[in-house]
Image (cartoon, coloured by chain):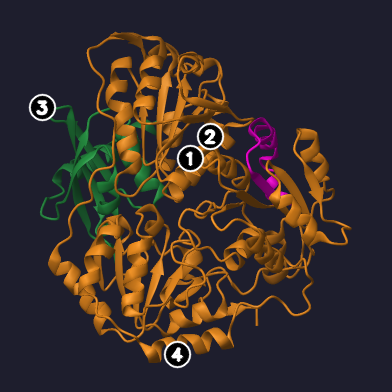
Amino acid sequence: MKHNGAEITIKLLERQGIRVIAGIPGGSNLPLYHALYHSRIRHILTRHEQAAGFIAQGIARTTLKPAVCFATSGPGATNLLTAIADAKLDSIPLIAITGQVSRGLIGSDAFQEVDTYGMSIPITKHNFLVRSARELFRVVPEAFRIAVSGRPGPVLIDIPKDVQLEEVIFNSWPQPGEKPEPRGIDLRELKQAARMINSSLRPLFYIGGGIIQAGAAPALFKLAHKNSIPVTSTLMGLGAFPGDDPLFLGMLGMHAARYTNLALKEADLLIAFGVRFDDRATGNPAKFCPQAAILHIDIDRAEINKIKKAHFSITADINLACKLLLPYIRRERRAPWLAQINGLKQKFPLRVPAGADQMHPLRLIADVKDMADPDAIITTDVGQHQMWVAQGYCFSRPRSFLTSGGLGTMGFGLPAAIGAALAYPEKQVICFSGDGSLLMNIQELATLADLKPRLKVIVLNNSQLGLVRQQQELFYQGKYIASKFMTSPDFAEIAKNFGIPGIDLRNSRRPLALLRRALKEKGPCLINVPIGQAHNVFPMVAPGGANHEMIGGE
Amino acid sequence: MREANTIIELTVKNHPGAMSHITGLFSRRAFNLEGILCAPLPKGGRSRMYLLVRANGRLEQIVRQLEKLYDVIEVHERPDYDHRLFRKLHELIKMKPEAANGR
């Protein structure tokens, strides 16, 4: 066989099972696009490379399989960086393939040349600069293997244009890169972990994105119920445990319900599964779970003892660990502990503020949950609306909630939702956004208009950067700078001008009926929801404060 | 009180980006790096690298982060190694500034 580097790359992607690539062509990746012309892979042309990265993330987050985005050299690659960094912090298997100037021009400050390799080192799990077409046979499958093995993460492949054009004669294709089988777990370690759980009086599960990544939600459910262990989740873990289960305590940390953080203070054993003790979850780590021994199981050994010293830890695939632990865990009812938790729940619930109107975000989000399909996929942007959705939506299925957790990237929501809709065209997809966040990738309404999926964008519009304003109110003596927009666009009209139905609940006498009808529509729709400007996300733990010292929400 | 130094011995894949991956890890995770020695091994496209680092509470974390790097094949803590090579290096560096500042 004789193919050039671009054809080899596309063929290898096909062999990996890739069906969709999001991207934007340019000078240095035109050969790749030329090869794509002859491929059955579907290309989604975005309006900004960052959105191509987030579309791929939307696919990867909902399928747990690697997804691919393309960008050209220079600005194409730099525009991708935010989406790659986002994937790194949330452990998403993203494959970013960038064009690079030809080998002979590298280092000469050529047109649209940047050091993509150098810039992507700190934000990828690994990266490759391909130096010959033949290397692609090793690099492409290896990139896929790296992206999904152990703790998943993004991999970047930078391919110079002349490598894309270089022809190679070869006999056979390499095997696709696959996820390796998880390593076994030492029985003695499992028994030690089980002993800790069985002998504890007030155990609490602290779960995170690792549970979802490993497909461990069913195994975790069995563990928690067998031993009657309450479960709290990070933002990234929402959906891994049923939101309406009596054992579920909601999200912990900075914007947890009061009872959740107070329960953590009472626990005598913290069972940390698939988590990394992020500061938004733990608050001040020294004051986090002061009475609890820590049992930490995670796939990434570097996360063990990084923030909090574990009393016992196992480095393992969390799904395998949950399954193998189950027979060693005693059946328990834990009536006193659950009664104590229920007391806290009743005394310190998550409250919608007194006097809040019908359109208070927490009410509206609960209403949307009631109106939406049970298997709807929800995405958010970043800010107050994100925290309200996390507090109020009641997720029950893994991979049904996509949010930028670690990096906190405004602009994530719309393109990630498009990616989810591409992965699951039959499902309803709802993107909750804010007026600040949506404007950061609003050009993707054009991509949405191209595809017309069953995707609804709900803009909780307060004409400000709400979470910034909230922090200025609480921690900067109410000196508001750069948090309130001087002008606000008409989002419903903007949507219409992109070719998407847009409605505005402003001045509507029956806003909920209007919302219900809009959500039922077959295609896309943008729904602008004006919300009060003074709302705060409560409770709140001051950055660096102890979790049990919460502000507001009483 | 000064923290004692220790040596981490690495076996790494020998390619142009490997050094960036390793030194970048130290800078972005705010690990201290006192010295580096690196030379190619006789065969197999590999290099041996010695890192002189502070032997403090972060050592375990440094080693575990190094182990995650794709280009790093082996990581060993070598508290038993003496620092003579690095001392020679430091002597070399100490000589340099005087020559350079002889303006």
Same chain under badges 2 and 3? The reply is no
- Identify whether A483 is placed above or below A337: above
Give the label on residue B42, or none: 3
Q: Position of residue A58 (x, y in %)?
A: 52, 43
- Identify whether A483 is placed above or below A53: below
Q: Position of residue A142 (x, y in %)?
A: 29, 32
- On whether residue A452 falls in the magenta region, the answer is yes
- At label 3, counting other C-alpha atoms closer than 10 Å, the crowd grade (few under 14, some 14-19, many 20 or more) is few
* 1 and 3 marks in contact (CB < 8 Å): no
Task: Tell me the kind of residue under disc 1.
Answer: Ile
Secondary structure, mark 1, is: helix
Report, in whole angstroms, how far the alpha carbon at label 2 lies from the one at label 1: 6 Å
Q: Which residue in the structure is indicated by mark 2? A: A80
- Which chain: green? B
Q: Chain of mark 2?
A: A
- Identify whether A354 is placed above or below A91: below
Give the label on residue A339, or none: 4
Q: Where's the N terminus of chain A, which quadrant?
A: top left
Q: Chain of mark 4?
A: A
* 2 and 3 marks in contact (CB < 8 Å): no
Task: Tell me the kind of residue under disc 4.
Answer: Ala
In the image, B64 versus A168, the foreground residue is: A168
Q: Which residue in the structure is indicated by mark 1? A: A84
The part of the image, by quadrant, that contains residue A324 is bottom left
* Residue bounds of the magenta highlight: A434-458
* 2 and 1 marks in contact (CB < 8 Å): yes
* 2 and 4 marks in contact (CB < 8 Å): no
- Residue at 73% x, 70% y is A477
The part of the image, by quadrant, that contains residue A132 is top left
